[in-house]
Amino acid sequence: MKKNNLPFEVTEEYYRSLENSALELAEAEYQLSLMTDGVDILEKSLMYKADLDFKNATESNKALSVELQRREAKRSAEYAQAVRAKAAAKRAQSLAKSRRFDLEKRFDEWRTRSADKRSPGRF
């Protein structure tokens, strides 16, 4: 976020920034939703694979316990990569929310300053 010593003013650039921040936040939330669901789907898929591997290794029809399936799934490099991607999406969402919050606070400050200018004898 850039800092300058000039007072903030509501301009067309502000409205463009506000619109861009809304689009950025929507995209970040979309990506996070995809990653969250993707990690869950990947975990179930890897659990299923672990169960099949267990059945093939033991040459039986006995299922691997759910806890052991989950443990095996979470040991996968593919799962770790998906979790990192989800964390990156969460970071992008947090940054987008922060930018949006900053723009809204600047507007509130401008509105207060503008109201104070209109009624100089009041305070």
Image (cartoon, grey):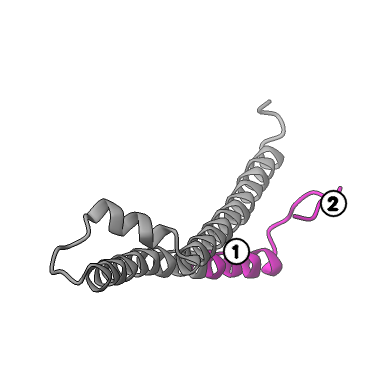
Say which quadrant the N terminus sits in.
bottom right
Comparing 44 with 53, the one in front is: 53
Q: Label for residue 49?
A: none
Magenta range: 1-26
| Cα separation between marks 1 and 2 | 18 Å
Q: Position of residue 25 (x, y in %)?
A: 52, 63
Tell me the residue that label 2 is attached to: 4
Q: Residue at x 17, y 62 (%)?
A: 63
Dot 1 lies on which element? helix
Say which quadrant the C terminus sits in.
top right
Tell me the residue that label 1 is attached to: 18
Q: Position of residue 122 (x, y in %)?
A: 66, 28
Q: From the viewer's perspective, is residue 109 above or below residue 121?
A: below
Q: Amino acid at mark 2?
A: Asn
Q: Does the stretch in magenta take in 8?
A: yes
Position of 74 compared to 4: left or right?
Answer: left
Identify the mark nearer the N-term, 1 or 2: 2
Q: Residue at x 35, y 66 (%)?
A: 37
Q: Position of residue 43 (x, y in %)?
A: 34, 64
Quarter of the image for residue 112 reads top right
Q: Position of residue 54 (x, y in %)?
A: 27, 66
Q: Residue at x 71, y 41 (%)?
A: 117
Q: Amino acid at mark 1?
A: Leu
Comparing 54 with 49, the one in front is: 54
